[in-house]
Image (cartoon, grey):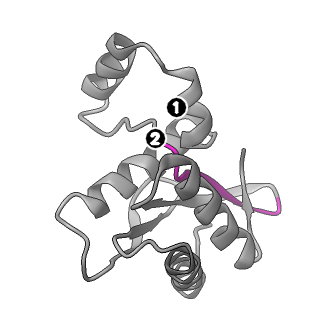
Amino acid sequence: MSVKLGTAQEIARVAFAEGEKQGLMVMSVVVTDPGGHVRLAMRSDAQGIFGVDTALGKARTALGFNRSSWLLSKTFVDPCGVASLNGATGGAFLPLGGGVVIQHDGVTVGAAAISGGMPEVDDTLIRQAVEAAGLTALP
């Protein structure tokens, strides 16, 4: 079971709307399936070339550890450990706030992430967007 496309679009719509309310104009949102494959990727007109890749890294990182990338940013503080995991995952490990695992009725259906704000802001925004779509964002 995976996040439906319409639900992914709703997550992105809410994330962009809430981000703009906070003054963010440079944002990217990615929603994946449970295997980390992209279901939806969007970026604001002002976003540079790394936004979608950054959001995808946050989403995959959350999936890989079954917890938010915000929590992982507090766990992985040793630069050598982060570099080692980044190398082991082919550059996919990105422990910065803004990526969450999405569940529906206790089943993981994907992940969602936003890049564009400070990590704490990104974490709050993506949680709001996932919950507005009627799903659960794991801590």
The quarter of the picture where the C terminus appears is: top right
Mark 1 residue crowding within 10 angstroms, few (<14) / some (14–19) / many (20+):
some
Please, what is the three-letter code of the amino acid marked with disc 1? Ser
Q: Are marks 1 and 2 in contact (CB under 8 Å)?
A: yes
The answer to whether 29 is drawn above or below residue 72 in the figure is below
Q: Is residue 103 left or right of residue 106?
A: left
104 part of magenta stretch = yes
Residue, disc 2: 96
- Name which residue lies at 32% across and 52% down: 54
SS at mark 1? helix
Q: Is residue 105 left or right of residue 31?
A: right
Q: How many marks?
A: 2
Please, what is the three-letter code of the amino acid marked with disc 2? Leu
The disc label shown at residue 73, or none: 1
Q: Position of residue 63 (x, y in %)?
A: 53, 45
**Mark 1–mark 2 distance (CA, rounded to whole Å):** 5 Å
- Name which residue lies at 45% across and 35% down: 95
Q: Position of residue 129 (x, y in %)?
A: 64, 72
Q: Is residue 73 left or right of residue 56?
A: right
Q: Toward which corner of the image does residue 75 lie, by quadrant? A: top right
SS at mark 2? loop
- Name which residue lies at 30% across and 63% down: 52
The disc label shown at residue 9, or none: none
The answer to whether 135 is drawn above or below residue 79 in the figure is below
Q: Nearer the viewer, residue 88 or 30?
A: 30
Mark 2 residue crowding within 10 angstroms, few (<14) / some (14–19) / many (20+):
many
The quarter of the picture where the N terminus appears is: bottom right
Q: Where are the magenta residues, as a range? A: 96-105
- Of mark 1 and mark 2, the one earlier in the sequence is 1
- Which residue is at the far front? 23
Q: Nearer the viewer, residue 21 or 128?
A: 21
The answer to whether 119 is drawn above or below residue 25 in the figure is above
